[in-house]
Image: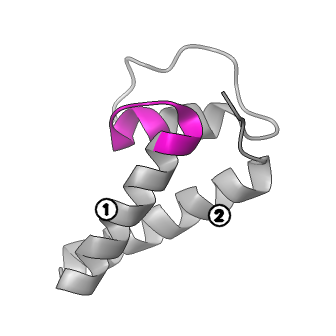
Amino acid sequence: MLMAHSAMLRNLIDQYEALAVLSAERGSDEVRQRMDDLAYLLCITTGTADVDSALVAARHRLPGARMEDDSLLTA
């Protein structure tokens, strides 16, 4: 599997999180579509099947990420 550069992962995470806030405030079709696109990209770049797993996997690939298992932590 190809691995995405950490800068790309950081960018995808930042965009997704920013749009999540916008979606909560103004859930327009454009915001939802962009979130779906970003979720897909995150899943593809991390080799996961859902956005929550993709976000965890992407964060673990960033420089300085903790190596402990945080699968039981809630967001």
Relative to 72, say whether 25 is above or below: below
As rendered, which of 4 and 70 lies closer to the eye?
A: 4
If the image is split into quadrants, where does the N terminus sit?
A: top right
Q: Residue at x 70, y 34 (%)?
A: 2
- The kind of secondary structure element at disc 1 is helix
Magenta range is 44-54
26 is within the stretch colored magenta? no
If the image is split into quadrants, where does the C terminus sit?
A: top left
Residue assigned mark 1:
36
Q: Gap between marks 2 and 1, in whole Å?
A: 15 Å
Relative to 8, 58 lies left or right: left
Q: Give the crowd class for mark 2: few <14, some 14-19, many >=20 residues within 10 Å.
A: few
- Which label is found at residue 11? 2
47 is within the stretch colored magenta? yes
Prevailing secondary structure class for the magenta stretch in the rendered image: helix
Residue 32: where, in percent of width, then height? 24, 73
Q: Residue at x 28, y 73 (%)?
A: 33
Counting residues from the start of the chain, the first of labels 2 and 1 encountered is 2
